[in-house]
Image: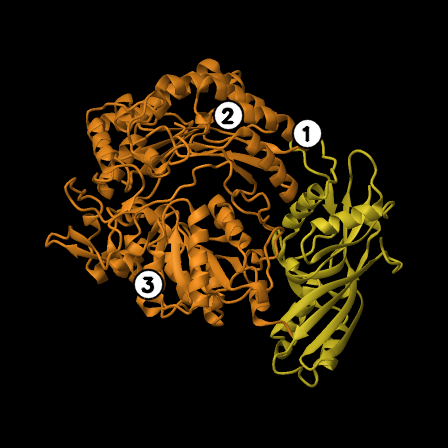
């Protein structure tokens, strides 16, 4: 007779997402395992398996003696329904064992709108949601990822957070847990010890006190917990662990390819960008190491595509050397080399043309703002000339489609800036007419605008978000100024970005809101099929929490911020200075044209910042 | 073009036809066996699988045609190297040259297991045998042009019903597998339609062997 799980698998979409058994999957003999970690990615298999960070940490944990780390992803709605109906608890892929039987439950969180999935996964696992309801060492929940830089909305649920890059700190955490389990420590004793590991933040050791107006009055560290927790980084990336023997999915995922991370950090300093500041300082890998890792990865996984990744690949000093090595190899092996995040400079244009031997990829720009004035405010170092020159060259080379991404609601934005987008698009169309070989083939300009979300640890962390009504007015204003049939204009619905803004700068009072929303059925919020704003609105009402407090109110520079305990290396003084320069429409040159003094280089002891 | 006979079992049954093609392409690459590529705008590695297998079905008789570049590699070595590069549940049984033309493939022997959680009803075996002894047996078929009726009987060459375990009945069917194609799961659909009280709690299907029209094993 077929067991229940296999009967369920037969009834759901894409069942291979739930079975494990892929090439490169790591299995261990339970007799050799002392610490079992369920590594949860709070989104679907297709998204999670595309994540490089998860692959790195999976490899690192499994390299440890006595540790077995297994993968868990958010089930799609049909699977969740079947699991609930038949009372099948959430399982990990490798062993197919229930997550609730694991010692540690780790989450990597890269997106605020996956918070509902975290709670939903714990519920499906049958694990108590609140830290205080989980007794003993079993089911210790910890989390890392970009969202851990303001973890307060999750403070009640997660036992501790691991800040920054996980290569070293994860090993320290697991080793400590191994010892704690062997010596039968209490949860309290373990948390006390783990909070002494640099980069570990235990929210339970801090009391947040509020003023009458709802702002924070004080953050009080309890019993000697550190006042500030500084994120961890890996100094020498050449020596850092890299997962060349990664898991190769048997089913299609979003980014189904080998990945090479060429450097970390960013020299650009776009003032809205959280990654650009929170991933500093800049550390590079050498082309030779990358080339060897590329060959090893491709030989192991048999992939036909390799991707060079970073926040801004044109800023990688070894790009020419690396691509000179990789292009001939990839051509021989019929491997597609993809290099996204290139800037519109000359070398990149030549490189793009060399890469076109396999397939013509799209031309995409993210000017973010429509006028040079506003681009100066946000420090987006991309000029109209650069865009139009690159377009001209591409159009004469036969391209006939271009994507342009913008944000609406940026600080100081006026209607003139909004109309500047239409004007820029008009110039792109005119450039096409002047440069294309055959006008009858037509042009497609895809324009998309996003609703600006102020993020913590950026110069815009204090900014107001505009109201959804105002955002929609600006969208309509823009739409009415597109007069060409070549233009396809998409604007995001404001609901999701509004919620994202709430949670990005949220505090501990949002914990109950997430819990109520999940009770109302919120999950898979990043997916249009499932996102239902009404479930969240009901949760805010139920908890008496005002969304405006976190969005349109704006934060005062003198205010204590919920994430003030957390130090990403970039100083608050620098962020204030950058904000002031934004209002003065003053650009800050990239780090290679002089150090702007963000402070992140202070995190380095062995090497210098590579900016 | 060499041909591989392979089986698909265990959790690998949840890998779709398209994903399986990709899985093989990567396995060849990992095994250091270079596939030739199709010509044209989108050059694809030349692998092709006869009779796409439905998601969830097991099989011991799948055929994969492929073509390698460069120095010839002995077939036995291809088999061994591929198996070292494949996942659990997908296993190459043999690799050989001069496979028969695929259009001569005509019949497929399958086993459909009907699972009854409260035991097989007493008269089920007899009534199901009778059902498939009818002259016509039409069931609904979902195709590209909506739902149409299809008569199963002309597509069934032989069928038998036997009890294999307390709660399981097994239908062994030898049916057409090309022009037209009998989907063995339609047998369960016919039971559901004509003998609704014998609808199983669950059913599963396994491909056993493939033949030409003369019932000679097809390779």
- Residue at image x 45%, y 57%? A174
Foreground residue among B124 and B168: B168
Residue A509 location in percent, x, y?
Answer: 23, 57
The part of the image, by quadrant, that contains residue A593 is top left
Chain letter belonging to callout 1 = A
Q: Which chain is orange?
A: A
- Which SS class for mark 1? helix
Q: Is residue A465 visible?
A: yes
Say whether mark 1 and mark 3 are on the same chain: yes
Foreground residue among A448 and A603: A603
The total number of labels drawn is 3
Foreground residue among B154 and A202: A202
Considering only vertical position in the picture, is A597 above or below B72? above
**Is A511 left, or right, of B38 in this rendering?**
left
Residue A55 location in percent, x, y?
Answer: 51, 47
Say whether mark 1 and mark 2 are on the same chain: yes
Judging by the rendered image, the residue that carries numbered circle 2 is A318
Judging by the rendered image, the residue that carries numbered circle 1 is A332
């Amino acid at each position: 007779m077929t067991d229940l799980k296999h009967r369920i698998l037969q009834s759901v979409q894409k069942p291979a997402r739930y079975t494990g058994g892929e090439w490169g999957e790591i299995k261990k003999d339970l007799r050799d395992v002392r610490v079992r970690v369920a590594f949860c990615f709070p989104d679907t298999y297709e998204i999670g398996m595309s994540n490089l960070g998860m692959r790195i940490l999976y490899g690192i944990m499994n390299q440890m003696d006595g540790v077995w780390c297994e993968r868990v992803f958010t089930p799609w709605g049909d699977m969740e329904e079947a699991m609930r109906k038949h009372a099948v608890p959430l399982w990990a892929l490798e062993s197919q064992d229930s997550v609730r039987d694991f010692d540690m439950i780790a989450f990597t969180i890269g997106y605020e709108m996956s918070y509902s999935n975290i709670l939903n996964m714990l519920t499906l696992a049958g694990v108590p949601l609140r830290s205080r309801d989980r007794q003993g060492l079993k089911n210790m929940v910890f989390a890392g990822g970009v969202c851990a830089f303001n973890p307060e909305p999750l403070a009640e649920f997660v036992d501790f957070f691991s800040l920054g890059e996980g290569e070293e700190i994860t090993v320290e955490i697991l080793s400590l847990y191994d010892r704690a389990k062997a010596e039968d420590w209490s949860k309290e004793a373990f948390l006390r010890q783990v909070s002494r590991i640099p980069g570990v933040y235990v929210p339970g050791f801090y009391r947040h006190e509020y003023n009458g107006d709802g702002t924070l009055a004080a953050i009080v560290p309890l019993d000697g917990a550190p006042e500030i927790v500084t994120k961890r980084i890996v100094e020498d990336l050449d020596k850092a662990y890299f997962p060349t023997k990664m898991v190769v999915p048997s089913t299609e995922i979003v980014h189904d390819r080998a990945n090479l991370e060429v450097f970390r950090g960013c020299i650009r300093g776009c003032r809205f960008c959280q990654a650009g500041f929170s991933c500093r300082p800049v550390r590079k890998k050498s082309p030779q190491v990358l080339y060897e890792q590329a060959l090893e990865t491709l030989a192991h996984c048999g992939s036909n595509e390799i991707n060079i990744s970073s926040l801004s690949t044109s800023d990688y000093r070894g790009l020419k050397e690396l691509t000179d090595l990789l292009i001939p190899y990839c051509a021989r092996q019929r491997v597609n080399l993809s290099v996204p995040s290139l800037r519109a400079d000359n070398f990149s244009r030549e490189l793009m043309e060399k890469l076109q031997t396999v397939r013509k990829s799209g031309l995409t720009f993210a000017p973010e703002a429509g006028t040079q004035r506003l681009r100066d405010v946000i420090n987006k170092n991309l000029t109209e000339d650069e865009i139009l020159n690159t377009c001209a060259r591409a159009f004469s080379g036969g391209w006939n489609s271009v994507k342009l991404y913008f944000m609406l609601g940026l600080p100081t934005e006026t209607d003139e800036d909004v109309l500047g987008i239409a004007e820029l698009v008009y110039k792109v169309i005119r450039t096409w007419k002047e440069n294309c070989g055959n006008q009858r083939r037509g042009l497609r300009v895809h324009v998309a605008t996003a609703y600006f979300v102020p993020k913590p640890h950026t110069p815009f962390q204090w900014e107001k978000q505009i109201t959804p009504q105002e955002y929609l007015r600006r969208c309509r204003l823009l739409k009415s100024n597109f007069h060409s049939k070549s233009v396809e204009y998409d604007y995001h619905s404001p609901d999701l970005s509004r919620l994202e803004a709430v949670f990005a700068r949220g505090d501990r009072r949002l914990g109950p809101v997430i819990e109520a929303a999940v009770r109302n059925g919120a999950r898979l919020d990043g997916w249009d099929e499932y996102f239902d704003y009404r479930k969240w609105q009901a949760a805010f009402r139920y908890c008496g929490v005002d969304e405006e407090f976190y969005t349109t109110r704006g934060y005062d520079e003198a205010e204590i911020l919920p994430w003030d305990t957390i130090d990403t290396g970039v100083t608050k003084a620098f962020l204030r200075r950058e904000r002031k320069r934004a209002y003065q429409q003053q650009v800050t040159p990239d780090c290679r044209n002089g150090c702007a003094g963000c402070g992140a280089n202070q995190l380095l002891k062995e090497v210098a910042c590579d900016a | 073009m060499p041909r591989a006979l392979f089986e698909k079992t265990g959790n690998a049954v949840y890998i779709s036809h398209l994903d399986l093609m990709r899985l093989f392409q990567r396995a060849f690459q990992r095994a250091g066996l270079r596939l030739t590529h199709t010509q044209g705008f989108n050059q694809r590695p030349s692998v092709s699988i006869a009779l796409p297998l439905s998601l969830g079905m097991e099989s011991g008789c799948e055929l994969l045609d492929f073509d390698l570049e460069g120095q010839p590699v002995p077939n036995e070595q291809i088999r061994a190297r591929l198996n070292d590069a494949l996942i659990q549940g997908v296993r190459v049984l043999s690799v050989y040259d001069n496979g028969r033309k695929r259009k001569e493939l005509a019949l497929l022997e399958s086993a459909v297991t009907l699972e009854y959680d409260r035991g097989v009803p007493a008269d089920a075996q007899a009534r199901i045998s009778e059902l498939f002894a009818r002259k016509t047996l039409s069931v609904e078929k979902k195709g590209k042009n909506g739902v149409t009726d299809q008569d199963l009987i002309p597509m069934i060459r032989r069928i038998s019903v036997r009890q294999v375990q307390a709660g399981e009945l097994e239908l062994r069917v030898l049916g057409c597998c090309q022009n037209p194609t009998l989907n063995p799961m339609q047998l369960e659909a016919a039971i559901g339609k004509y003998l609704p009280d014998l609808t199983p709690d669950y059913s599963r299907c396994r491909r056993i062997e493939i033949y030409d029209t003369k019932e000679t094993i097809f390779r």
